[in-house]
Amino acid sequence: MNNFDESPLVITEWLVPHLVDPRIRIVDVRWKSRFENGRGIGFDDFEEFMNGQIPGAVFARIAEDLSNPHVPFSDAFIDAEQFSKVMSQIRIDNKTHVIAYDDTGIPFGHLGYGGH
């Protein structure tokens, strides 16, 4: 395993030999946004997932399954119980190491990591 105390990030060279590791779940979280009625709307980019993904990856529907529709702003997560149900559906539990990826890039892909 990667020493996640040093960094939560993994590189391709680490990931390739772990693609079949049953303790790891690779999750594609690609999404896009558009403006409607002066408001940003997020939507899942399942089409890009179907066009190509990391082998063995599953698609997490951030906008459809993980966003809370009962709050006045977009992209707020659902409550912990519902989140657990969604994770269970894609075979993630408390013992699973999750490798999530997207294609958003800067700034979203690097928030909290010094902007590098």
Image (spheres, rainbow, N blue to C red):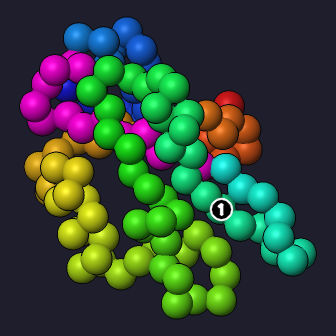
Residue 15 magenta? no
Residue 45 lies, with reference to residue 41, above or below; the image says: above
Residue beneath the point at 10% across and 31% down = 22
Q: Is residue 81 left or right of residue 44?
A: left
Which structural element holds mark 1?
strand
- Residue 114 appears at what percent x and percent y? 66, 41
Q: Is 81 displayed left or right of 20 in the figure?
A: right
Q: Quadrant of residue 109?
A: top right
Nearer the observer, 77 or 14: 77
Q: Residue at x 65, y 89 (%)?
A: 72
Residue 24: in magenta span: yes
Q: Is residue 56 left or right of residue 116?
A: left
Residue 28 % position (x, y) = 43, 39
Write the residue at 89% across / 75% down: 38
Question: Where is the N terminus found, in terms of image quarters?
Answer: top left
Is residue 115 something that shows in the picture? no
Circle 1: residue type: Gly
The residue that disc 1 covers is: 42
Taking 86 as reference, is 54 above or below it?
above
Q: Residue at x 53, y 63 (%)?
A: 63
The picture quadrant where one finds residue 9 is top left
Give neighbour class at mark 1: few <14, some 14-19, many 20+ (Cα, 10 Å): some
What residue range appears in magenta? 18-31
Q: Nearer the viewer, residue 10 or 64?
A: 64
Q: Is residue 51 left or right of residue 3?
A: right
